[in-house]
Image (cartoon, rainbow, N blue to C red):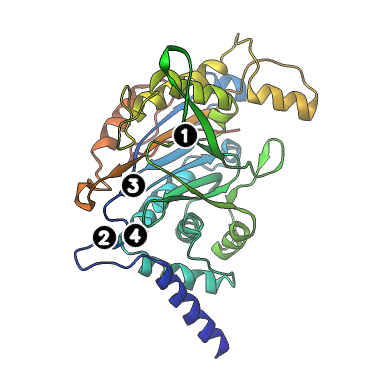
Amino acid sequence: SSFSFLRLASAAACVLLRPAMNIFGGCSQNVALHTKLLAHGESLQHPNVAEYKKENVRNADAFFTSEVALGVADGVSQVSKEGVDPSRLPRELMTYCKKYAKLCDDDPNQFDQDAEALFDECHEEFDCDRIALNILCRSVEQLKQHGACTALVMTLNEDGSELDVCCCGDSQAIIVRKTDAFGGFGKPYWKVVFRTEVQQHKFGMPYQIHRMPPTPPPARVVIDFLAAKADSQRFQVRPGDVIIAGSDGIFDNVFEEDLVGIIEDVAPNVDGYGRPIESTPENLAKEILDMAIQAAKPGYDQATPFSEKLAEVENKKIVGGHPDDTTVCVAYVISTSRSEDRADLYSESSYDSQEADNAARPGPPPPVQAGGYFGRPMR
């Protein structure tokens, strides 16, 4: 049939667009200079959340990081009023996103074939270049938990030259790049070269992946929504670029220029591979998290993105930020000179220390899961 012919043609085109694989493993393109992510994530429920929201709800944020991808999901705390644990859906979603990011990296052609079959079932057009969207949609197909959450997925393409991004809601990400200009004490200036767009019905009502009892929508309905509404972009990256991704607990409370300022103050220089010289992604993530937490504490008398937006939309004049569950992932794009220099992409060793650290921090600790996922209550 013509439909079968078009499907085969589309699959063939996707295979042709993928870099050829050599018999020793890895892509035959750009083997001499592959990029990966040096990443770390932190998540913490703001100590004033219970007082602000007049209820005790566990941290319902979730995230994952690896050497090829990262993601953030921001759970909606109000679902607890209907007897639903708000942390379970975002955790499950990030677990599947991590799984499919690995599958896509291991065997991109097989991943494309399976993803195209899913899109065919949903009568949606398939695009093999929208890698992050395809990862998110395949993950949504597997969901069993109830709840609602926003989602952000970012993944390197096959040769590591571009970052593919898919965003649904108000979790955001920026990419910051070192410039050739220098400031005080000889420190280089950095600038934001990419930022995702917030997707919302109106202020305070972001787009969400929604699965509520007693009859959650079929997966195809959610996938149709994501294919039509999710912000799917691709941006060229280079070694030394810094990716900062986070829930609204970060971007409601910290201005973009302050995020750049933290990099300039804490880790202004990178080596020839793009790795930070003075600091680590972990230190940067902790600095950003602490800044967001402080800005949302009582008595903070400065403007924040949240207070400025509230003044613009609702004409309310306030100072300070928004106490919320707060999650940040920081990743450096780094190069490796040979394909065999790439470490095990899914080693769990870094996650173990993150889980122990998160459990020791204030706020109700979520159950520890393999892979370094954490939760938080939201909005």
Residue 304: percent from the left, percent from the top?
63, 20
- Specify the amino acid type for callout 1: Arg
Q: Residue at x 34, y 29 (%)?
A: 270
- Specify the amino acid type for callout 3: Thr
Which mark is first along the chain, 3 or 4?
3
Q: Alpha-carbon distance for marks 4 and 3?
A: 18 Å
**Which residue corresponds to mark 4?**
103
**Which residue corresponds to mark 3?**
35
CB atoms at circles 2 and 1 under 8 Å apart? no
The 10 Å Cα crowd at callout 4, few under 14, some 14 to 19, many 20 or more, is: some
For discs 2 and 4, the disc positioned in front in the rendered view: 2
- Specify the amino acid type for callout 4: Leu
Which mark is first along the chain, 1 or 2?
2
Q: Alpha-carbon distance for marks 2 and 1?
A: 28 Å
Which mark is first along the chain, 4 or 1?
4
Seen in the image, is 69 located left or right of residue 259?
A: left
**Position of 247 relative to 45 (above/below):** below
